[in-house]
Amino acid sequence: MAVVVGFIVGFLALRFVLVAGREMLQLPVLARVNYRGAAIATACGLFIVMAALLVEAGRSMLGAFEIGDPPGLNPARPLILLAVLGFGFLGFVDDMLGSEDRGFRGHIVALFHGRLTSGMLKLIGGAAIALVLSAEVGFVTGERLVADALLIALAANLGNLLDRAPGRLLKFSLLAYLPLAFVAGVSAVGVALAPVMGAATGLLPEDLRERTMLGDTGANLLGGVLGVAAVLECSRTARNVILIALVVLNLVSEFVSFSKVIEAVAPLRWFDRLGRGFSARSGPL
């Protein structure tokens, strides 16, 4: 029940923040041209950050007055929130300062030419956050620490790679969340993760209708948070399997377009297009 309530509260918090902050969507600094040539507000993952922060603040306040869990009882909550804030911040920097350099190779080439791109800053910062979070989970060996940090960082980067079409990343994130939610159940991780994913779901209608774009703010955040949840909840064997899959997907992305693969595989194409029927015909928020 706590997980369901957390998910619903996260969803409602996002809807409240989105309505309250609707004027922000009209700011020129956030405007980006999408694949249809329409100017849409980017970096709307900020609404997920704010919703998650409000939910955690509310849970802490209520817990202090003996309504729900007392503060400090769930160690996963501050770790998940740190992932939301940290990866969201790095994504926002890239959204606002992003250059034309694309892909890991592009950022490396720029670095060899004496330029530190916002994308490389995001990658370096993401690796640092991943190391801090992995160390807090519980130190076992140096090798395990590096492996878990790599899993988190690659999950965050994969989120950025998938965010290329309306609703795509949110739908695939929710798909990845389902087995995590099943494994976590009502554990500390399950309770901590639910409001974040509820908030992400709250943004799905606007993303599908091309009223908003997650931007790297939301993409980086969602990938990173799911990576942290996997490290917190999954067994060592499961984490190794996830890590291998993430390494392969991140490497393949340097040579193959995920969008072309999705379009070529019927089930993936159906899932990717699901819910886009309203598209750009919808009016402003």
Image: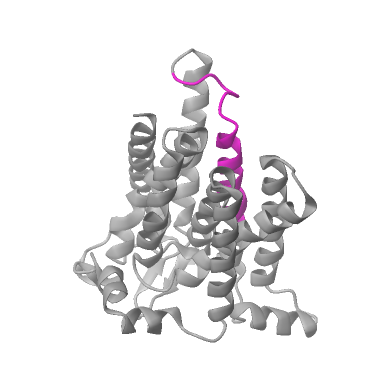
Name the quadrant of the C terminus. Answer: bottom left
Q: How is the image coloured?
A: one colour
Question: Picture coordinates of residue 151 (x, y %)?
Answer: 61, 59
Q: Is residue 285 visible?
A: no
Kindly identify the residue that appears in the image at 73 percent across and 52 percent down: 145
Residue 266, located in which quarter of the rendered image?
Answer: bottom left
Taking depth in this image into account, of 144 and 37 the one nearest to the observer is: 144
Taking the spot 33% from the left edge, 49% from the top edge, the residue there is 202
- Where is residue 52? Give x, y as percent: 47, 41
Assess whether residue 134 is covered by the magenta stretch: no
Residue 141 position (above or below residue 127): above
- Give the quadrant of the N terminus: top left
Q: Decide whether the magenta segment is chiefly helix, strand or loop.
A: helix
Of residues 236 and 149, the one drawn nearer to the viewer in this rendering = 236
Q: Residue furthest front?
A: 237
Q: Position of residue 186 (x, y in %)?
A: 42, 33
Residue 186 lies left or right of residue 149; in this view the side is: left
